Image (cartoon, grey):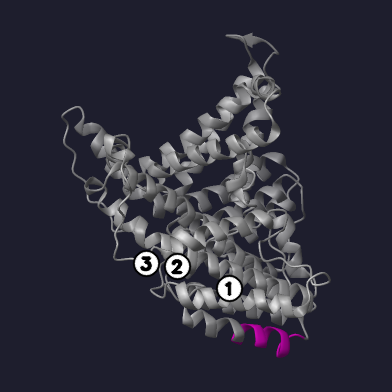
Amino acid sequence: MQFNTLIFAIFLPIVFIFYWFVINKKLLYQNLFLIIASYVFYGWWDWRFLILLFISSLSDFIFGFLIDNETNQRKRKLFLILSLCINLGMLCFFKYFNFFIDSFIDLFSLFGITLHATTLNIILPIGISFYTFQSMSYTIAVYWRQMKSTKDIISFFSYLSFFPQLVAGPIGRAKNLLPQFSKKRIFEYEKAADGMRQILWGLFKKIVIADNCAVFVNSIFNNYSYHSGSTLAFGVLLFAFQIYGDFSGYSDMAIGIARLFGFELMQNFRFPYFSKNITGFWQRWHISLSTWFRDYVYFPLAYSTSRKLPKEKYLGIQTDKIIYIIATTFTFFLCGLWHGASLGFIMFGLLHGLALSYEILTKKLRKNWLKNIPVFINSSFSVLLTFLFWNISLVFFRSPNIHTAIGFFKGIFSYSFFSIPHPDTRYNPLTIAVLLPAFLIFEWIQRNKQHALQIDTTKNPKFLRWVYYFIIVFLIGMFGQTNDIPFIYFQF
């Protein structure tokens, strides 16, 4: 069930009414109802996916209890390892089995050895990468003694299956989100109204910005060998706005829907295309994932290793800085692999790992270079350079394989790059030419808010607020794509 479908437009009000007006007397009933609604929502794609969600929920509820009540550190670590093996085992099998089998065969073929293997037709369960990481955050937090294990299995199941963020995040942290399921919720009109505004803005970003960009992007990427370099560059630019509108639009809707039910999810995007460097970009893009990798991969790897090494220099670089660079590159290698079983995603992750390593190495040097440059020029150039690097990395992200990505780059860096772009004229370019710049300007104006449609009701009269709503609804009705293009991050 997708947020931008008619069936969800029927599903959400029904769940909302039952939640607040029928079973609002007891917290237990509300949580139990959320589990049922979430399982209906998730099982709408394929009821078999519910089995994996149930296994992950039950196993980590049990292991969390065992870890918390065990005093022997070796046994606590064993329980944690078993929990991680179950979660990562399911994730790796369903997401990476075919990839590793095919890659293994390709590797041996380089040496003239032909292997034959039957690749299983494994269906990737939607959202498994998201709820697996959310579930692991619980057992890790209990193991690190950041929180106590819960004895309320209903609250835990509702936390892990909560339908607004189940299939594409934001990836909730157990220590922040799980306690919200143990407290009585009271309907607050202002929070619900702001949630509705965030849902509206997320829907606009998805079906007006992202989906209109998608028709051009798909046409250009699917026929890249027939297009000029300028058209290919134009396609990459539009994909940057497609993936941003698509994914941040989903996050906005997820956060807004959660607020309707009295929950606060973490902010997942903070206007990343206004970042001045790659470090800042990953502090603003897919925040729930980047901070997950930071806390559970980068910090343990970097700081535990750097403490054991002597403070010396190697090739003129401090050993602790070398460790940070290695940890950063490895973390983003895993980040790329998390996105999918493809060498293109791995290249995407490694590129960002190398860019962040460069920024670690040259932080002081760049500060000295730029101190005499006017702030406006420095900021503008930095934002453009960061956005350009992001676009280059997206070629690997969007291409189905490395061969296509290389061919795409060859097409861009040709003499035809200096020609006028000629995208498919069957599609209406008005959205791209007019609404995309207006969208950017509006987001720039609202860049210090939690979301672009966050409005101070004390400073904006009711009439003016409804004018805003009417304009957005009008644009959705006029320019919104109605062919239910799936959210990009459902494939991860």
Q: Residues within 10 Å of mark 1 (few under 14, many from 20)?
A: some
Front of the two marks 2 and 1: 1
Vertical comparison of 407 with 436: above or below: above
Q: Which residues are magenta?
A: 14-24
Q: How many marks?
A: 3
Identify the amino acid type marked 3.
Answer: Asn
From the viewer's side, name the closer residue of 43 and 240: 240
Q: Residue 428: which numbered mark, if any?
A: 3
Mark 3 vs mark 2: which is more N-terminal? 2
Residue visible at 64% across and 76% down? Answer: 469
Residue at left offset 71%, top offset 40%: 73
Cα separation between marks 1 and 3: 19 Å
Q: Is residue 19 magenta?
A: yes
Q: Assign a secondary structure to mark 2.
A: helix
Work out which quarter of the rendered image holds the C terminus and state it. bottom left
x%, y% of residue 412? 32, 39
Q: Describe residue 268's horizontal placement relative to residue 96 as left or right.
A: right
Q: Which mark is residue 472?
A: 1
Which mark sits nearer the N-terminus, 1 or 3?
Answer: 3
Q: Is 450 left or right of 96, judged from the image as shown?
A: right
Residue at 64 percent across and 61 percent down: it is 61
Left or right, 452 with respect to 226, comes to: right
| Snapshot quadrant of residue 19 | bottom right
Tell me how far mark 2 sits from mark 1, CA to CA. 35 Å
Q: Are marks 1 and 3 in contact (CB under 8 Å)?
A: no
